[in-house]
Amino acid sequence: MSKGREAAAGGGAAAVLLRYLREQNRPYSAQDAFGNLQREHGLGKAAVVKALEQLAQQGRVREKVYGKQKIYFADQEQLPAASDAELRGLDGQIAARSGQLQALQQSCRHMEAELKDLNSSMTTPEIAKEIEVLRKDCASYTEKLERIKTATNHVTPEEKEKVCREQQLYRREWRRRKRMATELLDAILEGYPKSKKQFFEEVGIETDEDHGVELPAAT
């Protein structure tokens, strides 16, 4: 390609890029600009890089360096100033987009909560397994209940009442005899020169407490 054609191609790329940066009014790297424009305008990456550098040198676009990457964007001073009506329109668009953003954020929170509930819930196979376990338990309990119903060794209400009366009688007798023995031993220990423990060991007395025996509760 001759130098004249190269210059023409470079000038065309610069015009395309300048118009694109002003229309989009946002920063782009050379790679991003190349990826967005190559299909429509057939620009090569080298041509894009060269054109952006020339535009920056000419002061027609602004250039910022972040590490090893360069970012290009339209010079805001060269863009036409917006009228009051345009500014009000932009404010309205910002308010509308802010409302949409809040609605989307709320929707996302609802979906996240629903997803959390679903993740904590049992899966269909787990539910089926749990149902099978419960069915087996029910069958086992039903069988046990039937055995109890058909058993012939049930305790009648009269027999139960008799046992309760005997238990109360024996309990009262136990308490009476224990109280009598305690009073007798206390009387003996008043004149005994040694300790209560030594006396019990010499005589061979064993208490309920020695065997961990407690008086049954009243029924």
Image: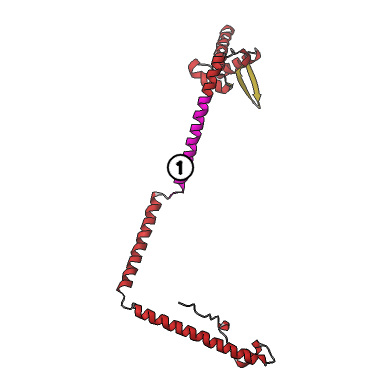
Where's residue 187, x and y in %?
A: 63, 91
Left or right, 26 with reference to 104: right
Where's residue 34, x and y in %?
A: 54, 20
Where's residue 175, x and y in %?
A: 52, 84
The residue located at (49%, 86%) in the rendering is: 173
Q: Is residue 71 above or below residue 214?
A: above
Left or right, 165 with reference to 51: left
Viewer-nearest residue: 142 or 85: 85
Residue identified by numbered label 1: 114
| Quarter-of-image position of residue 131 | bottom left
Q: Residue furthest top?
A: 4
Where's residue 160, x and y in %?
A: 38, 79
Q: Quadrant of the C terminus?
A: bottom left
Residue 37 visible to an observer of this rendering: yes
Give the class, few, some or many, for how many residues have Cα within 10 Å of label 1's Cα (few <14, many ≥20): few
Viewer-nearest residue: 56 or 149: 149
Q: How many marks?
A: 1
**What colouring method underlies this structural image?**
secondary structure
Which stretch appears magenta?
95-121
Whether 98 is among the magenta residues is yes
Whether 71 is among the magenta residues is no
Helix, strand or loop for disc 1: helix
| Quarter-of-image position of residue 32 | top right
Viewer-nearest residue: 125 or 53: 125
Judged by its main secondary structure, the magenta piece is helix
